């Protein structure tokens, strides 16, 4: 009975995201190939690992047992690679950082650029996840640092403010929507331009549409906020993006920004860690840098 690391990584990603589609995306696999790999694993073990439904996948008791072992194996391999690569490339260490979409697209590039330039011997592995998935990963020790929406339940973790942004509606200049604030539910009859399904923020928005009882009508899915706004400019649909992205787009594109009245549109981003005192030295250096970035670049106090 043999499994390769791709099988294990795919299985863990599918369980953590609750979706074989998102799991395949994280693993760089086509959905059909991912489905075949999971099915072959189940055939080899002669037990079902995942229960599939329209809403995604849930882990079975056997799958839950498999999950624990898979995480141990993947963590050991990652540690092995990191330790060996330090000798080969002169690196002193690697930091595992998970981030939601807004922080990853709008703030982390500015924050990480100077840090990496000042610390050429440190590498940072960054992965996009949903906020609640990030919290679970930090608690489980699968990540050193997480950046999540302030609304996430971070009980038991040490946290500090990182940045502040909000989600807004972007419409073409010819749209009849606005200029006064609107609720998300009132525009769910419109066609939307969104990000790929593997995007954490797209999942977040889709979940709120389901809660409103009217699934979002996605006409197109693009690879980034700028591309989304370009499609809005051409009147292909409307979109929900971080305000910082919308303001940047409005400078060069024929789009308008309309505020969302929903409370969940307000996005306070926070850094979360399990214990700063127990972080590896390289991760502690990055945490200190993120504190300084929050205070100087975004004007937030981290005390």
Image (cartoon, rainbow, N blue to C red):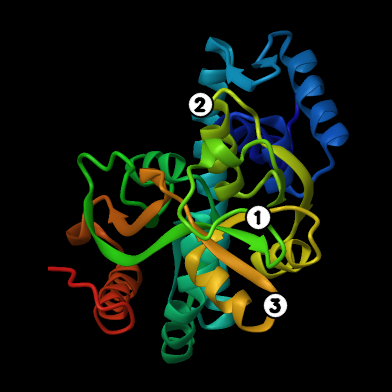
Is 261 rendered above or below residue 245? above
Q: Between residues 143 and 226, which one lies in front from this camera angle? A: 226
Query: Which badge, 2 or 3, comes first in the chain's sequence?
Result: 2
User: What x and y, as percent, mark residue 17?
Assistant: 58, 35
Q: Residue at x 50, y 60 (%)?
A: 102
* Distance from the alpha carbon under mark 1 to that under mark 2: 25 Å
Labels 1 and 2 touching (C-beta < 8 A): no
**Quadrant of res 33:** top right
Label 2 CA crowd tier, 10 Å (few <14, some 14–19, many 20+) = few
Secondary element under disc 1, as helix, strand or loop, is: loop
- Is residue 19 toward the left or the right of residue 223 in the image? left
For this view, does 183 lie left or right of residue 12? Answer: left
**Which of 16 and 162 lies nearest the eye of the viewer?**
162
- The residue where tag 3 is placed is 253
Q: Are marks 2 and 3 in contact (CB under 8 Å)?
A: no
In the rendered image, is residue 73 in sight? no
Instruction: Please state which of the two labelled residues, at mark 2 or mark 3, is closer to the viewer.
Output: 3
- Residue beneath disc 1: 176
> Which residue is located at x 85 percent, y 27 percent?
36
Instruction: List x then y, in percent, for residue 62.
Output: 57, 12
Q: Which residue is mark 2?
A: 211
Q: Is residue 7 above or below residue 280?
A: above
Q: Position of residue 179 (x, y in %)?
A: 52, 60
Q: Nearer the viewer, mark 1 or mark 2?
A: 1
| Badge 2 element | helix
> Which structural element holds mark 3?
loop
């Amino acid at each position: 009975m043999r499994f390769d690391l791709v099988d294990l990584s795919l299985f863990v990603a599918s369980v953590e995201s609750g979706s074989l589609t998102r799991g395949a995306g994280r693993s760089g696999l086509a959905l059909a190939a991912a489905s075949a790999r999971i099915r072959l694993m189940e055939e080899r073990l002669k037990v079902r690992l995942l229960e599939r439904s329209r809403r995604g996948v849930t882990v079975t008791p056997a799958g839950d047992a498999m999950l624990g072992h898979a995480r141990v194996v993947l963590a050991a391999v990652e540690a092995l690679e990191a330790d060996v690569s330090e000798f080969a490339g002169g690196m002193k260490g690697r930091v595992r950082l998970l981030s939601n979409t807004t922080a990853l697209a709008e703030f982390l590039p500015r924050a990480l650029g100077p840090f990496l330039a000042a610390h050429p011997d440190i590498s940072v592995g960054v992965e996009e996840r949903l906020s609640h998935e990030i919290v679970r990963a930090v608690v489980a020790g699968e990540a050193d640092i997480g950046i999540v929406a302030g609304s996430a339940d971070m009980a038991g973790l040490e946290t500090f403010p990182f940045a502040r942004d909000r989600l807004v509606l972007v419409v073409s200049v010819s749209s009849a929507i606005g200029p006064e604030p609107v609720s998300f539910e009132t525009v769910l009859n419109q066609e939307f331009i969104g990000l790929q399904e593997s995007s954490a923020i797209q999942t977040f928005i889709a979940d709120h549409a389901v809660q409103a009882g009217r699934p979002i009508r996605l006409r197109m899915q693009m690879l980034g906020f700028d591309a989304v706004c370009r499609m809005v400019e051409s009147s292909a649909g409307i979109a929900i993006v971080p305000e910082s992205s919308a303001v940047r787009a409005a400078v060069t594109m024929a789009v308008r920004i309309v505020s969302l009245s929903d409370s969940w549109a307000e996005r306070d981003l926070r850094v979360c860690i399990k214990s700063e005192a127990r972080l590896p030295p390289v991760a502690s250096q990055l945490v200190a840098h993120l504190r300084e970035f929050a205070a100087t670049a975004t004007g937030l106090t981290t005390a």
